Image (cartoon, rainbow, N blue to C red):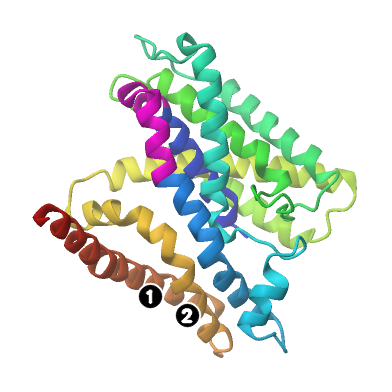
Amino acid sequence: MITDVFIMPIMFLLAGYFTVPVLQKQGMGTFLREKIIRIVIPWIAGVLFLAPAITYMIWYSRTSTPPAYFTYLFANFFTAATFNHAHYWFLGDLAWFLLFFVAIYKMAPSMFQRKVEASVPSAWFFVRFGLVTAATFFTANLYFHADEWFSRLYLISFQPTRFLLYVCYFALGIYAWRNLWFTEAGYMPRFTNWTRLAIVMLSVFAYYRITFGDTTPLVLKAGHAILHSFFCLTAVFGFITLFHKNVNSKGYIWRRLSANSYRIYYIHQLILLPIAYMAQKLDVSVWVKYSSVSVISLVLCYIVSEYVIGTAKSQITQSKSAV
């Protein structure tokens, strides 16, 4: 309930932050070609070949009499009611975001030139941003459940209440890059301030969601939207300051985790879900299960990425070089 709020906005903010400099460095043609290879093809491959197994595991763990896998694959998965991109939806949405951004950039490249002097955002800037994202969440929540998914068009999968919120964070990443945020010369969020705010908002948000499970009344929808948006905002900047302060190093572990981060993202559900299923019925504290499954999954994902996929990739590269 908690980590679901801020993980993806961080991803979209980072994507937006690095989009313009990469485009300017590579040029339009190379940029689009690289994104097709690195984002579009893995997205389509993941949806067609891996998402069915992932969604079947989710169904299997929640259904007393699940169908056989191939029955589910051919009779259920590709129907409009069941079709699901699994976690590869992020690549699909990001691909669409980049496509629209490139179209805008081509029409007005001068809009995306980096400023010479850094600008420091005011507290009111963040308040306005939080209110705008809350408004997008609230408006969509009038027509869709807060956690509902929309995948009926096959080519895109998203949560309606969060789609425009993600657009805002992608745009915020571009704005942050243009204004030299997170650089030595520019704005760097203060660790103490943002961390304290994030902890306060986490506590209030968690209490609200547990207390008001049914947010059908408009006033409760509004409260949910505001708390979701401001907890998201404070957590995003809280984690940026936390990692800048404590993880901004070139140590071996951090370098290898960084190098494997995309592959870990790509395979993690295939490893995580079976482990979570095995731990599901253990008669131990949920905190023990959550932390144990998280650590074991991360270690196994890293091992598979670094020593199985990484080794295979190196051997293929060496074979091509030899040829």
Compare marks 1 and 2 and give the one earlier in the sequence.
Answer: 2
* Residue indicated by mark 2: 275
Query: Looking at the rendered structure, which numbered label has been put on residue 80?
Result: none
- Left or right: residue 288 versus residue 295 is right
Residue found at the very far left of the displayed protein: 322
What is the C-alpha distance between the residues marked 1 and 2?
A: 8 Å
Residue 74 shows up from this direction = yes
Tell me the amino acid under the disc marked 2. Ile
Is 304 a magenta residue?
no
Q: Tell me where residue 45 appears, x and y as whole percent.
A: 49, 58
Q: Tell me where residue 278 appears, x and y as whole percent.
A: 51, 86
Using a 10 Å C-alpha cutoff, classify the residue at mark 1 as few (fewer than 14 neighbours), some (14 to 19) or many (20 or more): some
- Left or right: residue 303 versus residue 15 is left
Tell me the amino acid under the disc marked 1. Ile
- Left or right: residue 178 versus residue 86 is left
Residue 188 shows up from this direction = no
Q: Tell me where residue 44 appears, x and y as whole percent.
A: 52, 54
Query: Looking at the rendered structure, which numbered label has been put on residue 296?
Result: 1
- Quarter the C terminus occupies: bottom left
**Residue at x 55%, y 73% (from the top left corner):** 53
Q: Which residues are magenta?
A: 20-37
Do the residues under discs 1 and 2 have CB atoms within 8 angstroms? yes
When the figure is inspected, residue 163 is found, relative to residue 276, above or below; the finding is above
